[in-house]
Image: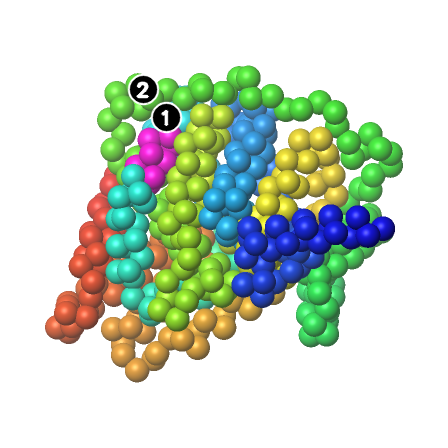
Amino acid sequence: MPGAGKERAGREFSLNRFFKLEERKTTTRTEILAGITTFLTMSYIIFVNPSILADAGIPKEAALAATIYGSVFCTLLMALWANFPVAVAPGMGLNAFFTYTVVLGAGLSWQTALGAVFISGLVFFILTITGVRERIVDGVPSILKSSISVGIGLFIAFIGLKNAGIVVSNKDTFVSLGKITETGPLLALFGLLVASFLLSKKWKGALLISILVTSIAAMVTGFIDYPHSVKDIASLSLPSLSETFLAMDLKGAFAYGILSILFSFTIVELFDNLATLIGLSNKAGLADENGKIENLDRALQADAIGTMASAAMGGTVMNAYVENATGISEGGRTGLTALTTGILFFLTLLFTPLISFVPSVATAPILILVGALMLSEIKSISFDDFTDVIPAFLTIILMPLTFSIAQGLAFGFISYTVLKLAVGKHKDMHWMMYVISIAFIINFIWGSH
């Protein structure tokens, strides 16, 4: 019908104008597909985060609700305010720091720890709106920016290999090859082959198709169960925030004198996000010829506001996920990708059991491939100057080896500053490099006690 066609065209025009689809050379279909792919690769957080927070004493149902609501709220901010193709959820690593270091290690109550999370989000927000964030970005040399992308790529690939069971822990050699003839690793290798084949054929939706095909294969082989009825995949009872909403103890956080804890939360939050957003933005082609990233300040503001909201709900520090690279690889370039992911997160309130039918061996191959794709940034690294090469190498290699983006950053920044000073090239450095390096050194010293 003519009227229906005009209405559809109007909606498409509005989306194009709001999200700048044409300007960023993408389409509504591509963005939605990318959002679905991102959701499937990072949806594991819905199940993992509540389990970690439950160890801290937070009621598991409330932790589940805080995880979903916090992810939806912050992802929608990223979509509608910053127009970034990046979904946000409680940070893996920071939630472990919250539970095992702050609560169980330091003996704080989870309410006091939530207060610390809220304060760190506030500090991060102040750093962003005062322009300190911009000075930090401007002060980061291009060699480290490229190294960040490569390091995140290796980190993503390592997570994928670990989730696939291809790489496992070993008490003698730290890591070793897993039992690849078992069903899990074989399924992951099958998914890797399917995704690689489809990518080589330039199929749109190659990564998503691989996830679906591998999930079906997992059900057929009996590796995971399959839904037997509607009751298996639908739940009408919404998880409640009643036990954790506004339960954070700000007075307790201040009274404890937790300067080192606040510093750790804030610095890791700042640089994990900065590193991830720079890497993802470069991969999405959002940086201009001068390396400036449009709306990066809004993206960081959205994350800081999201962290404060998460703490108020009963959740931990929010982070832009490296798994967003899967959606970006599918062509995600605008906030419409994040909007799609945020809507899907919201729908999990009704259909949380559905996520359990997408096993980690189905998403692991995608992470491995995305890690490989992000290695392309290595071509931007010059190997002519060892005062550049060594910091770049340390940044890249220590992200996966320490299982921490922040630790890789710390070694990269500190070594860059020290080496440049040692050879008399201090004039080549932005003054912010001194500030960042000193901050990392202080964090190392506090963290060792």
Is residue 126 toward the left or the right of residue 17 in the image? left
Eyeballing the image, is 393 above or below 98? below
Eyeballing the image, is 390 above or below 448? below
Q: Which residue is mark 2?
A: 252
The reply to whether the magenta stretch includes residue 123 is yes
**Rendered image: mark on residue 245:** none
Is residue 18 toward the left or the right of residue 115 in the image? right
Spatial separation of the CA atoms under disc 1 and disc 2: 8 Å
Q: In the image, what residue type sits under mark 1?
A: Gly
- Which residue is drawn at the image coordinates 87% and 36% (left, top)? 228
Give the quarter of the image for residue 112.
Answer: top left
Is residue 259 toward the left or the right of residue 149 in the image? left
- Which residue is drawn at the image coordinates 36% and 53% (left, top)? 407
**Rendered image: mark on residue 115:** 1
Eyeballing the image, is 427 above or below 431? below
- Which residue is drawn at the image coordinates 73% and 48% (left, top)? 7
**Residue 271 visible to an observer of this rendering:** yes
| Extent of the magenta region | 117-125
